[in-house]
């Protein structure tokens, strides 16, 4: 089903590609149906059919709406745990520097650990190509009109990647501070990235994301002298939403503060989970 | 807008429940939606129209949403309170560290079956 309008399009909901792979094009179908949609409903209660014994019967359901995603996420988690793979889900708004942080992290760690990457974007394999240039195995998920990765996409991408035992799996989510908060992918840790070129009030505006993350990387600190941004204020807001969120200040461009992030990662790989 | 994929999930849950009961239609789907569930109720209602329209069983069904207010417990003094949002500190001791007891719900509570 189409993720935008719910029409019964049979086109795939998402695509998974490796860099350099010939892009399968799935041109999205046209939503211009040549007529105007109206949303008027008749609210009359005259029924033309005979009432059956079902009519008006209330069935208790009590089912979590996200149950299907959560169950798949747990399957992913079990697979990753069995292979001793540390999986991180990197989330942020667009432009916070997720891919640049990832590139520097990979360059720093690739000689010591096996690392694989899943890239999530609505369109293009641009990010996967950047990661591939570092020599790291990567697959790109294109969500099309979808605004977040979900557990099913990651399940398929992991099968495609086939990450080795005792490795690190980095999942770069779609740049969006709202929707990815609700979708567990099966990761060990969710890492939210906020850059100093954004507002300090991001944790207050998007509490779900900061509430559901375990680590916060405060990126682009090399730009602090040029922007009106208070790290203290950001931390004060974070403390309001999630006092347990572990904050690390760094600059992916200069490498300042990167040691603390790498040390945290090393600690988790060595079983300090 | 993740509300659309949420609406699609609701349709699937309601459909499978209705089929288990050999129903030929659903007239109402009742949801509990917490204030801190990350769901915008207006966006969900909007998404529901198209998500339900694609289902033969649900195309005539309405959505009944029970908002669930936030209930927090202060991690310092154990005081329980219902703030307007997650930013508020404990009104009793002023501490910021809280545990969410209620308000993250997002579930299909019941469905009402319709005639053929």
Image (tube, coloured by chain):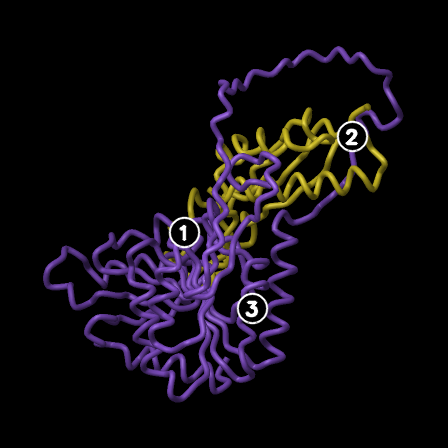
Chain colours: A purple, B yellow
**Badge 3, how many Cα within 10 Å: few under 14, some, many 20+?**
some
Marks 3 & 1, CB-CB < 8 Å contact:
no
Please determine whether, in this image, residue A109 is positioned above or below residue B27: below
**Which structural element holds mark 2?**
strand
Q: Residue at x 48, y 73 (%)?
A: A169
Residue farthest along the left direction in this orientation: A226
Number of marks in picture:
3
Asked if residue A170 lies left or right of residue A260, the reply is right
* Same chain for the residues under marks 1 and 2 in the image: no
Residue farthest along the front direction in this orientation: A22
Residue bearing mark 1: A123
Q: Position of residue A80 (x, y in %)?
A: 58, 74
Asked if residue A194 lies left or right of residue A152, the reply is left
Asked if residue A214 lies left or right of residue B106, the reply is left
**Which structural element holds mark 3?**
helix
Please determine whether, in this image, residue B36 is positioned above or below residue B60: below
Q: Nearer the viewer, residue A64 or B68?
A: A64
Q: Quadrant of residue B61?
A: top right
Residue bearing mark 3: A160
Q: Position of residue A115 (x, y in %)?
A: 44, 79
Please determine whether, in this image, residue A220 is positioned above or below residue A1: below
Counting residues from the start of the chain, the first of labels 3 and 1 encountered is 1
Residue bearing mark 2: B113
Q: Residue at x 35, y 71 (%)?
A: A102
Residue farthest along the right direction in this orientation: A53
**Which structural element holds mark 1?**
loop
Q: Position of residue A96 (x, y in %)?
A: 29, 59
Disc 3/disc 1 C-alpha distance (Å): 19 Å
**Badge 1, how many Cα within 10 Å: few under 14, some, many 20+?**
some
Q: Quadrant of residue B112?
A: top right
């Amino acid at each position: 089903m189409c993720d935008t309008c719910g029409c019964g399009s049979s086109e795939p909901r998402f695509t998974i590609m490796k860099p350099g792979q010939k892009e399968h094009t799935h041109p999205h179908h046209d939503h211009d149906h040549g007529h105007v949609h109206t949303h008027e409903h008749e609210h009359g209660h005259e029924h033309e059919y005979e009432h059956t014994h079902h009519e008006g019967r209330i069935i208790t359901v009590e089912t979590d709406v996200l149950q299907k995603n959560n169950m798949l996420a747990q399957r992913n988690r079990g697979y990753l745990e069995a292979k001793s793979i540390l999986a991180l889900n990197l989330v942020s708004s667009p432009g916070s520097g997720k891919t640049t942080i990832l590139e520097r992290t990979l360059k720093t760690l690739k000689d010591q650990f096996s690392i694989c990457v899943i890239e999530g974007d609505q369109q293009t394999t641009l990010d996967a190509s950047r990661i591939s240039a570092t020599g790291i195995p990567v697959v790109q998920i294109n969500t099309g009109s979808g605004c977040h990765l979900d557990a099913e996409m990651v399940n398929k991408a992991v099968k495609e990647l086939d990450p080795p035992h005792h490795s690190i799996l980095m999942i770069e989510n779609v740049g969006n501070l709202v929707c990815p908060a609700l979708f567990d992918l099966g990761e060990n840790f969710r890492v939210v990235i906020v850059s100093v070129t954004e507002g300090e009030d991001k944790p207050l505006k998007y509490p779900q994301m900061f509430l559901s993350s375990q680590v916060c990387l405060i990126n682009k600190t090399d730009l602090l002298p040029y922007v009106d941004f208070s790290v203290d204020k950001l931390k004060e807001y974070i403390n309001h939403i999630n006092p347990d969120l572990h904050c690390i200040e760094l600059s992916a461009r200069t490498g300042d503060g990167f040691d603390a992030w790498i040390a945290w990662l090393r600690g988790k790989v060595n079983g300090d989970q | 807008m993740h509300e659309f994929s949420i609406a699609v999930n609701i349709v699937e849950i309601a459909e499978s429940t209705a089929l288990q009961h050999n129903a030929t239609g659903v007239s109402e789907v009742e949801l509990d939606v917490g204030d801190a569930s990350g769901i915008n109720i207006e966006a969900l209602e909007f998404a529901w129209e198209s998500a339900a329209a694609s289902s033969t069983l649900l195309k005539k069904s309405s959505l009944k949403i029970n908002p669930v207010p936030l209930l927090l417990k202060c991690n310092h003094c154990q005081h329980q309170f219902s703030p307007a949002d997650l930013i508020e500190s404990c009104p009793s001791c002023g501490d910021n560290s809280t545990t969410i007891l209620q308000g993250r719900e997002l579930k299909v509570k019941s469905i009402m079956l319709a005639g053929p």
